[in-house]
Structures are given as C-alpha cells and as structure tokens.
Image: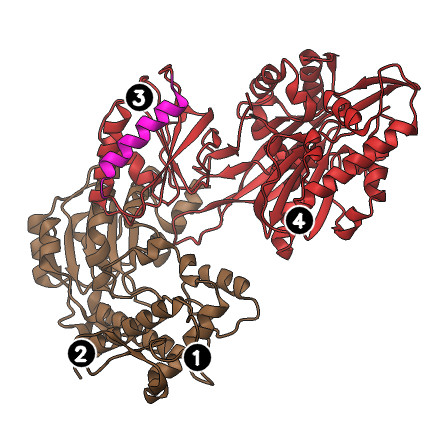
Chain colours: A red, B brown
Amino acid sequence: MERNEQIISAGIDIGTSTTKLILSRFTLMNTAGSSHVPRIEIIDKEIIYKSSIYRTPLLNETLIDMKSVLGLVEQEYKKAGVRPQDIQTGAVIITGETATKQNAEEMLHLLSEQAGEFLVATAGPDLEGIIAGKGSGAFQRSKETGQTIANIDIGGGTANIAVYQAGLLRGTCTLNIGGRLIEFDNDRVKNISPPVRKLLMQLGITLATGDGVSFDFIRPVTEAMARILVHILQRKMTRDDEVLLLGHPPDWKVPIDQIMFSGGVSECIYGHEPSSDSYADIGVHLAKALQDNPELQDWEWIPPAETVRATVLGAGTQTTHISGATIQVDPARLPLKNLPVYQIGMDRNLEDGSQKVKNAIQQAIQVYDPALEGKNFVLYLTDLPFLRFRDVQQLGNWLIDAYRLQPNQTNPIVIVLQDDLAKVLGQTLLAMQSDRDVICIDQILVEQGDYLDIGNKLQSEVVPVVIKTLAFHS
Amino acid sequence: MNTELIETITKLILEKIGDTSEEKEVPPISSDSGAGMVKLWDHLSSENHYMAAGTEKAADPYSALNSDELVKLWGQAESPETNIPCSETAVEDTILPELQTRIGVSSPLNAEALQDSVTKTPARVGVGRAGLRPKTETWLRFRLDHGAAVDAVYGNVPEELLESLKFFSVSTMADHKEEYIRRPDLGRKLSEQAKMTIREKCQFKSKVQIIASDGLSSQAIEKNLEDVYLSFLQSLDQLGIGYGTPFYIEKGRVASMDEVGEILEPEVVVLFIGERPGLISSESLSVYLCYKPRKGTIEADRMVISNIHTGGIPPVEAGAYLGSVVQKVLKYQASGVSLVHKEG
C-alpha cells in the first residue's frame, strides 16, 4: 500500500471581539481501486492545535493592530511546533465589524503572506455564515438528517445566517446583531455602533456614550434583535426590520426545520469554554433575550459542535477542496491567488464552439480586466459533450485563439473543468505551443463570480483549491 | 434465430415505452372528460403514430396497463428525467439506450432518497417490480444489454479503424471465436505467421511497444481505441518518450504481450484490450502495462487501468494519464507490485 500523504491546514479568524487560530492535519488517500485512475480524497481531518481565544488587538476604533496580530499568530505557531512553511493550505478570515476597519484588507493579505504560502484570505458576510455553518456542524447535520437547518453565528459584530438543506446551501443573510454593538466601561456606555443607534431611534430611546448602564435600554434593544431575527428566519421581514439588515435580504426559499446558534454569543448560551471572561458588552443579555423569545422556541434548537470557534474551525477545515488526480499544472506558477471565475456552459455540444469560447473570453476580460491591466481569471468550462480526441484538439485551438485577446500574454492560461478532462486538455494546449504556461485542473465545482485560489502541487499529484464566494465587498 | 431482428424489435418496444412515458409526463387534464385524453400506440398503422382513445381504453390491455402504471409513476416522482446526468443521455450512437424511467418503483416511500440512490449507480436498483417479476421494460433492457454483451464478444473490429490508425493486424493460435473462448491458452500464443510479420515490420528494442487486441470486446476497441491511442501518443511526445510500431492482435489475451516482449524486446509493453462485457457496459477498455514482459512473467508484474469508456474514465483523459504511468515504469524499471515496492 502506498503511504497516505498528510498536509497541515491553518484557520485564523479575526473577529469583532476575538481572534483565534486552529491547526489541523488532513490525510489524503487514493480511494480508487488499484486498477483505476487515481482519485485523491481527504479521508481524515484531525485538529492538532487550538489556540486560546484572544481579544482582537486594535490600535483604535478604525485600525487593527497588525503587528500584534502577526505576533500572536507567530507565538501560537511556536506553541504548536509548526513553521509557516509547514502550512500547505487554509484560510484567514476577517469577520464581523473587523472587516470594516480601514486596514482590514491589508491585514488579511499580510497574514496570508506571512503565515503560510497557501493561506487564503477570505472575507464577506455571506462567506462568514457559510463557513461558520460548516464549523458548527449544521452543514453536516443537515446532510445526515436531510433537515433544513439555519445556522446563526452571532459574534461581537454580526449575526451570520446560513441555511442548509440536506447538505445544500439554500441561502444566507447577515444582520447587525452582535454582543459588542454596545460596549460598556464599568457602569457607563462606552460605545454604540451606528446600526444600533438607528435601532434606538426607531425604538424611541435616547442613549449617548457616558450614560449609565441600565436594563431600560438593554432589554428593548436585545429583545428587538431577537424579534428581528425571528422575522428573518420566518422570511417575514418588515420595513422596520431593515434597520439591522447588512447586505441582501434572506434568499432561502424553504421553511426552516431547526436552528443552531454558534459564535461568541452562543457561548453564553451553551458555555463550552472554561473561561468566563467578561466582555463588558451586551453579549450576555443578547443570549438571554434569544433564550427568552417565545417564537424562537417554535423551532427545535440543536446545540452546536463548536460555539465561539465555529468560524475558525470552518476556515481551517472546511475551505480546502482537492482537485482531480489527472491534471496538468506548471508548478512554477503556483500558488495562484484570488482569481475570479468566468463560466462557459457548452450545452453539451460543440456547435458554434469557436464563437462561444471567443465571446466568453471577451466578456471575461470586460468584467474582470476592464482597464486591460492584465488581470487574469479562471475559465470554468462546463456542460461539455462527450469529447473525442479530435474534439479536444478543436477545443484547444479555439481556446488558444481566444486567449490571444488577453492583454497580458505572460499570464498563465488557467482553466477549470467540471468533467475529468484536465490532463488531456492541458497537454493539448501545451502541444499547441502557445508559449503560455497552462494550469488546467478538474473536478472542482465553482460558480460564476466565485474567487479561486490554487495551491502548490502535492505529492499525490493533486492541488488544493480554496473557493471563495466573494473576497471583498467594495 | 435472427438476432438482428430480435434487437430491432426489442428496440422498437423500448422506444415505444420511452415515448409513452414522455407522453405521460404531461399530466392528464381530466380523466373523465372522455375521448382524446388517453393516447394509445397505433400498432396497426405502418406510420407509427398515436391515436386518441377514450372509452376503448381497455381494448388494448398492454397500453392500458402501461399507461396506468406510468401515470402513477410520473405523478410520484417529479420528472425524474431531469436528474439523469446529461452526459449519459447525450451519447447518441450507443447501442444501449439510457434507462429513461430511472425510478421504477410505483409508489416509493421516499422518492427523493430513492432518486438519490439511483443516480449514484448505473446498476439496476429501484427498478420496481410487477408482482414477483421484473417490469417489462426492465426485463427487455436486461435482454438488450445481455444481447449487446454477446455481440461485443463475437464481433469484429472494423479494418478501416485499424488502417486509419496504421495498426497492422496479426492473429493468435485461436482459429475462430468459439475456440478462442474455450481455449484461453491459444489466445496467449501468436501464430507463426504473426511472429514473422512483427519481426519484419516492427522496430526492435523500442522504449514503448503499443499493441491493441479485441480480447473479449471488439466494441471496446471500436469505440475507444482511437481516442485513447491518440491522446496517449500526445502525452508520450510531450514527455519525450519514444515508441515503436503499433499493431493489432486478433483474438488475443492479456498474456499475448509476453511473446511480443520475447520477440521485440521493448522496455514497456502497453496493451489496449477489450474487457469482458457486463450488463452495464459492453464497450469498456483496459490498458495493461508491463515492464519487459517475457514468457513466464507473473501476473503481479502487470498493471492495469480499467473502466475506460464513455461512462467510465473518458478515453482521452485515460490516454493523457497513461503517459505519466509509462514514465514512472521506465524510471523505476518495474511495473505492477514490483513498482509499488520500488516506489517505497
């Protein structure tokens, strides 16, 4: 038997209130029979290190203390006995209100460069919800039971909802509901976040920083948050509820069977972590309001596998995919980061293929490289018919031709295929000697508008791939 | 028995069943509104078309039975057709039409779960039953698939295909198919004529000697050889690995490569050979590789990549992958279990 390859994945979550890190070890195995073309899969994920939960270091209200965050990560790596170069995959996620800090993007990119060669930078409220739902166990549970589960990850700044039905993502929604939206300093109000100011106005409550802490405003605010959450889950959002909505309204179209709470506020409900550090904010009260809301009790509450660590666990263990085993990649060109995906569906035939391919490349350039600065993208080829060798040659010709439209001809041609055809197409493109490097991988499911990161080639001849729904909302 | 006729009739009936089920996808607007609502197959007319039938529904027991069943079936599972991967239905020239009514169970307890299981395998699961027996469609398909398997064994690879790929043809000691099937040993030995021909025509001591053989499925060669072979050559060219003169062995077995190894002494023999057909596919191709095969080579030193066909690993991709396997065999100077040992 061949020995199974192991890789180390890191997950780092920089949230509104807390920052944490986990390291896990993935075991890859060829699960195809010995007489078949190999199929490499992740067969085991073992958490090898969990950091403590740290308060997110901030310089002031608008800046993250990047030096301290980096120092924190370095210190945790040392404790775990790994070096940045040992990390082969994983994701850094910047969540909640921290994502709105001025240097958030800079922080992400700094970390993804310094803390491992293929550590992917991710952000965006939808992605947060999706990742948290995987880390909390909601995704897995829905897959096993076939139920529709809403995972509600409530941290310091936002509540990120992801709805999974039988293992399929049905929709997301993000609300400005979090423990840290009103902060206290001893017995005084220290800070009120802008969305909560609006909510207070709507509720007819006057509150300013420096006022005394009182249930007179805490209770109405947390109760309103619980009420708005109920409306969102029921898909009965009113105009008043929009005050706490961040981004799009709920987009799932199925009724929810069960709910699961994860994130820091759920920690106040379930108490998984030993420390009872006080955060001097409304977190505990929000947890109480959720528990006391009678309408939320209409759904069955499923305790999460992870509370405050759900997102970091999701980022560290659920973001990596493995490509097909027969691929064609130029190792010198890897890793590739943050490439947007442009999809061409071939409708199961090659008629007008030449024009279709050309149009697609033209449009991809228009969308992703409008200023013709030479920004690259991934071409995602789907719904191909059964291809004979001569069809592959023809397709190769069309692609080479169309790719001449790209302004920067030194960029590699990056193609992702739905079907198991990457090696032959990659070899065909190379055989046509277009002087361009080729990265051609397959058996990865992505969507138009996703962003893709492709890692270094592993010993098993596969590449790790991280798919992100959106890197940064501008 | 005229096998062609049987196949034609079977196909006709299957098509008819397919057509009726398509018709039935449109839910009957109202069953009691009389004529024109139930469509029957007009088997008396030379032009095949449906005729409207109302009260005489029971007159044709076959159609009536079928339509009843199908109405129920389509009512239960929401258009199961959409769940069939298109790649399979798009293949037009296959001799095995896809099962169009994948869920055959009339009133499944959990249609979604059953559909999920059914789409995971080409095996005949969830086909339902009629009393103690299989349903007509299931049974006919079984017969058709079995017929196709038999045809694949007894068929011949067209000359034009071999000529177009520049494969010359030699035979083994097996004279005819019956003998080939009964005497596997004869399929492993080249005829004297064959030995002479390959000595004469082939490059001696090449790096890679490519051979094709019908084995137990001529269909496998007919459908897949061109794609897998051309793609394989492209990958060899890219890796800078040279290859000798390819040829075709009629009625050959896997171990026929041993004699080729003796005569031509290539470093690696790559043999494309038709697999024993099954009821899922009769056109599945295998590739056997062996480092310096000789008489007495043990089976553990051969390696195989199987399941190459439209519904398995795509032939073009298999060919592209094969180059890297040959590269590995050449690097370690071993194949099969020995290769695994050497790789560590």
Q: State the residue position of label 3.
A: A406
Gap in Å between the C-alphas at discs 2 and 1?
40 Å
Gap in Å between the C-alphas at discs 4 and 2?
56 Å
Q: Secondary structure at mark 3?
A: loop
Q: Is residue A134 magenta?
A: no
Do circles 3 and 1 both sit on a common chain? no
Question: As shown in the figure, which amino acid type bears the numbered disc 4?
Answer: Ile
Look at discs 2 and 1 and give the one toward the viewer: 1
Mark 4 near mark 3, Cβ–Cβ under 8 Å? no
Question: As shown in the figure, which amino acid type bears the numbered disc 2?
Answer: Leu
Residue B47 sits above or below residue A11 on the image: below
Q: State the residue position of label 1.
A: B32
Gap in Å between the C-alphas at discs 2 and 3?
57 Å
**Percent x, y of residue B19:** 31, 70
Gap in Å between the C-alphas at discs 3 and 1?
64 Å
Q: State the residue position of label 2.
A: B5
